[in-house]
Image: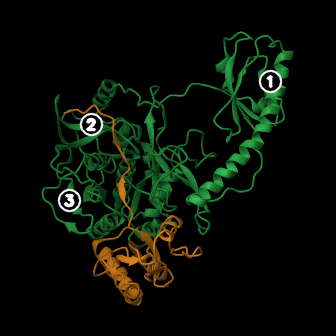
Chain colours: A orange, B green
Amino acid sequence: MYQRNPFNHKISVDFANRLSNLQPQQKVRVIVFLHIDNGKNCGARQSPAERKAAIESLRNSAKHALEYILNIIKDFGGQPLTEKPGALGQIPIEICAAGVNALAESDMVKAVLEDQIIQPSDGTESSNTSS
Amino acid sequence: MSIEHKISPAFDPFLAGLDEDDKRDAIVIYEAPQTEGLPKRGRLREVHSRLEKSQQRASIQKALQEEIFDHYTEASRDLGYSDDPLEISLIGSGTLPVATVEVTHKTLEALAEQPHVVAVLPNQSIHLIQPRRVEYADLVTQDNSESTTWGLNSLDIPKLWETSKGENVNVAVLDTGVYAAHPALNNRVKDFVVIDPLGRRITASPPFDSGQHGTHVCGTIAGGKTDKGVSIGVAPHANLLVAGVLIGNTTLRTLLEGISWAIETGADIINMSLGMSYYEPLFTEVLDILINQYGILPVVAVGNENHGNTSSPGNSYNAFSVGAIEKLSNNKHDVAFFSSGASLVFPDQEEAGRLVTKPDVVAPGTQIYSCIPPTRTPEGTYAYNYMDGTSMATPHVAGVAALLMAANPRASVIDIIRVLKETAKHPVGGTRRPDNRWGWGLIQPLEALQALK
């Protein structure tokens, strides 16, 4: 069984437990949040130009971090599922359970999240429609 | 523990009106014997071990039970029940330290005063929680007479419209899609995309809703008036950017692609009336980037799992999470039974105070009237309906945030969150907040607007 690192705060406890039940070579889909080094804007609303610049800056920073972890991904038989990181500095990756921990140990990775299912917050119809 | 504290106050109504010798069933809970820690759940060997320990526990408890029962039988005999003794029966196999015991007004204290007894509860009937019947005719009449839904009315939204209607604020809605051709959403949907389960962006025209949820949420944020003149939307001039991220079996990747699209499309606010399958504290990374890198306000439903529970991402320490209130018959409000709320510990978050209480605020979230895609039923075709859920409370807050942003374009997201929390109204005042039902309280948009100035 795959052994998780209990001191690693880059993987949630739930996900780490699920990983520990996988065989080392069993593949999972994860979202890797890459290290970004641009400054914070303290929540100020952005103009379209400022937004564009912020996206560009964050993506460049994330791309740089991605280059550092490509070898880890390759070594563990994984592959990125998109060509470049998204506007959150995230990239979806398919990789084996052992590779997830290796990624989390890299300084270029902020967090690794399981690509888990999402659903509406179950807004229930209380009937009585009207035209 | 005193005898009074061992006897449940529920006995007052339970025994009310009975003669002093009338018998009723009570549940007695007694001390559980101390045993070594139980093994972990899961593996077969551990299941066997757990079973053995449970059997050991049951045998120790049996001796304790017999002692309690003997003393109670003796005491009840002294109180005059020797010819017609009070019945005592075990519950289950003895793995839990509980039993059913007949009591009367006279014997209740005799049972509670035994040192090994922890609590005595009435064996009251239990029932399914049935959906309450809602008098929709009254709601429709009231909404029509006030020309706004009860949600907008209770937040004094029409007064805010004298200052702002959400002009030039982009609210992204990540949901089941939107039926943009609805008359109540006329010209409000400025962009639409479908994110498929593989995270691909699919341009679809005209915009559509795979259910009703997304259109209903959009109507509460930026809907106009119904054909009967009832206003349904909080910020009727705000722009809607809608991503269908809940179409098919979608995952976190789909949601994050939707968020990326919203960032790139110019969102100022993102409404997320959605949840994940299990707890994901690391979603804080996403919210941190939205707030601090892009100045976007994420408004997230706290979930419909009742008091004591929450769902991700609404339970992230930095989520602005929303619970639901309902309108009571006396024109008061209370938190809806389904609305989630709990406190979570984030040991690494010194700044957030380690213990984080959710929800942050509450807003109207039951019997919310809004638009839906035209729906055919045997009775006719419908374009509006009522829905319940924190999904419905969240767009009220997103809409209010749009009004505040439009009125104060330079206000930061952090300031908007702060004023909405600080001005929120808790029924017992400021000393008890935040709590797990009301959070900081019911938002007060007019006061928040003043505070922002």
- Give the residue type at disc 1: Glu
Q: Residue at x 37, y 89 (%)?
A: A67
| Residue B328 point in image, percent of width and height | 45, 30
The residue nearer to you, when weighing B385 against A30, is A30
Q: Residues within 10 Å of mark 1 (few under 14, many from 20)?
A: some
Q: Is residue A90 in sight in this rendering?
A: no
Circle 3: element type = strand
Q: Residue at x 39, y 63 (%)?
A: A116
Q: Residue at x 35, y 49 (%)?
A: B395
Disc tally is 3
Which quarter of the rendered picture does the N terminus of chain B lie within? top right
- Give the residue type at disc 2: Asn
| Residue B4 point in image, percent of width and height | 78, 29
Give the vertical position of B341 relative to B142 (above or below): below
Circle 1: element type = helix
| Residue B113 point in image, percent of width and height | 83, 29
Q: Which disc is residue B385 wearing?
A: 2
Q: Earlier in the sequence, mark 1 or mark 3?
A: 1
Identify the residue position indicated by label 1 in the image: B109
